[in-house]
Amino acid sequence: MPPFTPASNTRFWIVFVLVGLSGTAALGLPMFFVREPMETAQYQAPEQPIPFDHRHHAGRDQINCFYCHPHARSEAKADVPTIERCIGCHQQIWTESPMLAPVLRAFASNRPIVWTRVNQLPDFVYFDHSMHIHHGVACVTCHGPVEQMARVSQQAPLLMKWCLDCHRAPEAYLRPRELVTSTVWEPEQPPAVVGAQLASAYGTRRVTHCTACHR
């Protein structure tokens, strides 16, 4: 029997296609997987050492974001509130609440509360909170409606594409600086019009070069 029959050509193409599909799947599936919320931690709300409820603080009481995260306006890292900031209020209110016992113990022992990070960027990514706030990017743009969250969850995928979507067209995400903490602000004109005006006023540029985020 000859080594190559009329069916050999068909078998060759079947094997060729299967190998090609296998190679594509081997390369494509991991790229797909790392973009899934399960891998990016999007929508996940890690448990915290103290059940701090943003619905109560940022929602009902309307405490400004910068009261607890003042460094966001002037530094790269927003940071979390110090134990002294918590005690400033809770030495006077809810002093008998069992949920506040860890806060009082931490203050008495002069030990900080070790919060679990919600939005965790890789070490090779540089992000400056103050720069974004200076250009009118709202807290809710990245962090979502925290005033509606009992436990804060990561709202953004934090993928490179997500960052670049904003950097390529920042006008769509800008608002007046004095309103960056507002969760109810609505532009009086189309967002593109307002954003273009603010971008011009704030000197906002479309920064997409690698060293903007990788330093």
Image (cartoon, grey):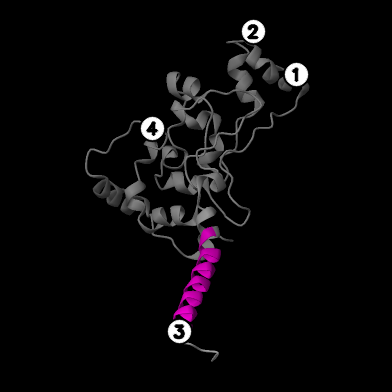
Q: Which of labels 4 and 3 is toward the front?
A: 3
Q: What is the span of residues highlighted in magenta in the rendered image?
A: 7-29
Amino acid type assigned to the residue bearing label 1 in the image:
Ala
Q: Earlier in the sequence, mark 1 or mark 3?
A: 3
- Residue beneath the point at 23% across and 38% down: 188
Q: Earlier in the sequence, mark 4 or mark 2?
A: 2
Amino acid type assigned to the residue bearing label 3 in the image:
Asn
Vertical arrangement, residue 89 with respect to residue 130, above or below: above
Q: Which of labels 2 and 1 is toward the front?
A: 2
What secondary structure characterizes most of the magenta part? helix
Q: Which residue is mark 3?
A: 9
Residue 62 magenta-highlighted: no
Quadrant containing the C terminus is: bottom right
Report, in whole angstroms, how far the alpha carbon at label 4 lies from the one at label 2: 32 Å
Q: Which residue is mark 2?
A: 96
- Residue beneath the point at 39% across and 40% down: 177
Report, in whole angstroms, how far the alpha carbon at label 4 lies from the one at label 1: 35 Å
Residue 15 magenta-highlighted: yes
Q: Specify the farthest residue to the front.
A: 1
Q: Specify the farthest residue to the bottom.
A: 2
